Amino acid sequence: MNPSELQQYLDFAYIAAVVLFILSLKFLSSPKSARWGVLAGEIGAALAVVVTLFNPEVVQYKWILIPLIIGAGVGVPLGLVHMTAVPQRTALSHAFGALSAAMIGIAEYYVGTAPVTRFQMGEIGLEVIIGSLTFTGSLIAAGKLQEILPQRPIVYRGQNIVSLSVLAAALGLAVALVVNPAHTLLFPVMVVIALIFGVLLVTPIGGADMPTVISLLNSYAGFSAALLGFVLNSKVLVVAGALDGSSGFVLSVIMCKAMNRSFTNVMFGAFGQVQASAAAGKEERVVRSASAEDAAAILEAASSVVIVPGYGMAVAQAQHKVRELYDVLTKKGVNVRFAIHPVAGRMPGHMNVLLAEADIPYDRLIEMDEINGDFPQTDVALVIGANDVTNPAARTDQSSPIFGMPILDVDKAHTVMVIKRSMNPGFAGIDNPLYYLDNTLMLFGDAKQFVGAIVRELSGNH
Amino acid sequence: MPADFMSNLYVFILAGFVGFGLIKGVSPLLHTPLMSLTNALDAIVVVAAIIIAGRHETPLTTALGAIAVAASFSNMVGGFVITDRMLRMFKSPRSKQQ
């Protein structure tokens, strides 16, 4: 077989892989067919990898096979992490994807055979900058989610000016390289500055904004792969990168809408600073608290209960106890459903995964827009570790930093019960008027223990 | 402007619209597995990494290629494994009774 004939066969295999990738995402539209999506993706990916090994440009295999084995050795444990660790694992995989794209772009620059043209230099420069900043930015995000780094926003005066100047410096060097691609010394400087910008980009962002940040980093990682496809003239990379990039972009838009904020506000808004004034000027107000026994009696008398989970449920690892509560109430004939806010947790869909892991059927997990109309007919809304997404100030108080954000209307339920450690408003510092309403009962304690205590009360009196 | 660039741009724009359409069809229920699946698909950059490492041009490019192969292949393997694990957990009411 001559090389150009072989190249045609390789191209056919890549086209087949692209078709399988698109089918893979298509299958994901329903939970019933979703696992077929994984299979389609796996076949496409395996096909593409295997045929690439026959590419005539490949002349040695040692430094392909060893990294493949290492990659599988790292990838399998990262695929088996506990479900509560999925957000940081996802951030880490954005970092790996971006690292890979950046490394290949850098290698393309240093390939000695043909000097890069100015046009190629522009593509490589942009690709390497996006890949590098996504790499360090995703590492910082993973560190925050793993709580190696502080989750609160780290902010200082003039931060945006410093960050934007660093980005401008990286872009300026890229332009200088386009003018003269032979400035080989400028290239590593540009890479280092882009890496620094990634750190500066994500450090000021707080834990509550992580769903948007993870989605944006997903989008950057995808678009850097697509740009790499332009550099290497590889259509399969252009398509896979465009699919991943548009997926991250769509998710970012959904997350931003769910917080009533713009991209620029998330990336450069330094959310933490805004609340300082809001937290001040708080007067003493009365809250009513209740015991597990009281809560159990109210739940038992209810005919419809909506549970609102939040990041606090994930932190307390309370999802399995929540499942027990779901079981015991369902057995007593109570209609129990879960209200899922798009930004509950630390990444898109975080709560759904945790509750599915705890064996709660997915038809009980209801999106915000679908369940909000049902709250006035709901006997009990039980809030577990969620705060801002239930804050009625978002509807009414124009001075609130979260005014305009779509929320779950739990305050419209006949009775609201909130499981919370204490009245401490947490690092976001936004006071929640929900806690002071007449129909609200505060259940103070650890989410896991408190739900466990309610379950014991409920199963005790048959 | 090189001809390759124009044809890649066509492909990119069309694939982007296909992506928007497909992702909008994914239920918010599955947004976490969606992200891990697209991550695994994006790891197809491993094919470019294999070629860079396999060309064996300079020690530097081979090393960069090798790192890229390991990083992207770990994403590919890990992404598919965790996506499948997550999707197995999403049980319909009927399958729970069985």
Image: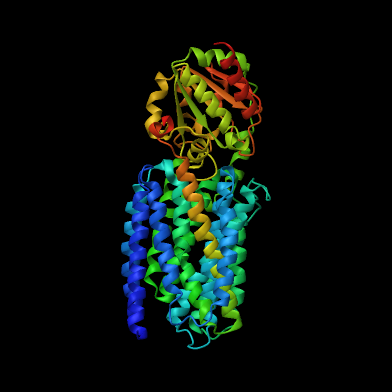
Quarter of the picture containing the N terminus of chain A is: bottom left
* Residue occupying the point 55% across, 21% down: A417
Question: For the view shown, which residue lies furthest in the front direction?
Answer: B98
Vertical side of A27 occupied by B29: above or below: above
Q: Position of residue A98 (x, y in %)?
A: 53, 64
Instruction: Tell me if residue B53 can be seen.
Output: yes
Vertical side of A69 occupied by A160: above or below: above
Q: Nearer the viewer, residue B14 or B55?
A: B55
Instruction: Tell me if residue A288 can be seen.
Output: no
Q: How is the image coloured?
A: rainbow
- Which quadrant of the figure has residue A159? bottom right
User: Would residue A223 appear left or right of A207 to someone viewing this image?
Assistant: left
Q: Position of residue A246 (x, y in %)?
A: 40, 57
User: Would residue B39 appear left or right of A138 to someone viewing this image?
Assistant: left
Q: Nearer the viewer, residue A119 or B19?
A: B19
* Residue occupying the point 61% across, 82% down: B59
Q: Position of residue A361 (x, y in %)?
A: 44, 33
Q: Position of residue A320 (x, y in %)?
A: 57, 32
Vertical side of A75 occupied by A123: above or below: below
* Residue occupying the point 46% across, 74% down: A53
Quarter of the picture containing the C terminus of chain A is: top right
The mark total stands at 0
